[in-house]
Image (cartoon, helix red, strand yellow):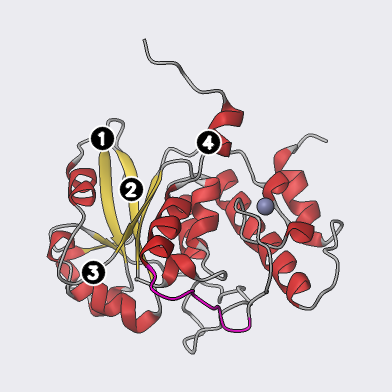
Amino acid sequence: MPRVPKPAEIWTEPHAVSRLRSSRLARSVKPFLARGGIQGERCTGCRLVPTHCICALRPDVFTQAGVCLLMADIEPLKPSNTGWLIADVVKDTYAFGWARTEVDPALLTLLADPKWQPFVVFPGELVASERLVDTVQTQAARRPLFILLDATWPQARKMFRKSPYLDALPVLSLHPDQVSHYQLRRSRRDDHFCTSEVASLCLDLVGETLAAQNLQTYLQVYTHHYLQAKHQLPADLQSPAHQALRALASPLS
Ligand SMILES: [Zn+2]
């Protein structure tokens, strides 16, 4: 009988985005230098400098839904990438590097797995109406799998157009009524959410409110630590985001 790992062991194993980052780094000819990023030693668990590490703050929540990240080539290397945060929170997160001319067979296997009900998450205005859905009917035997294109907006459009294995899948178009709060990488489109915010909206849509709130608040905590480190200031562990994250972990206290 296979040994069931204890939760602590699960968390110490690198997740899918971490593994993708490692394999991408191994293929790099020259070191990746993040623009305006923090220099020096980084925690391998959260990518922040050790003084601003958030590993101990990582939420531990259950989700029925899974996430499949298709990441543009350089995306796993960016310190501001938020797909990493999704993998921290949603235990069934898969991550694949995207290339126009090839596809990882493991991605095709995942998309064909009957235990998953896959949806491509993409803005509806660019998609044929017969493919569009704006709600997810959860099925007992099939768990929702949200496919997120983790890339800049022009890259995401190209990925959507040039991935024939996505063509048969329904497209979930989100109608957010709030603009992005993400401060690290502002998009010129102010309705363009960062990837972890998109994942939060998807979780919310299928009724996984606690997980959605955890992911959204964890993004705020990450953003705070990142910006404080960048400006060489200490992280404020009593910030509103920290307090909200603690309240989510123990709602009765
Ligand atoms: Zn850390």
Q: Are marks 1 and 4 in contact (CB under 8 Å)?
A: no
At mark 3, the secondary structure is loop
Residue 198 among those drawn in magenta: no
Q: Are marks 2 and 3 in contact (CB under 8 Å)?
A: no
Which residue is found at the position 39% from the left and 45% from the top?
66
- Magenta region, residue range: 28-36
| Sequence-first tag of 3 and 4 | 4
Left or right position of 142 against 174: left
Reply above or below: 213 against 167: above
Q: Quick one: 44 or 218, which is closer to the camera?
A: 44
**Residue 202, can we see it?**
no
Residue denoted by label 1:
115
Determine the CA span between mark 2 and mark 3: 21 Å
State yes or no: Cβ of the residue under disc 3 lies below 8 Å from any atom of ligand 1: no
Q: Crowding near pointer 2: few (<14 within 10 Å), some, many (20+)?
A: many
Determine the CA span between mark 3 and mark 4: 31 Å
Q: Quadrant of residue 101?
A: bottom left
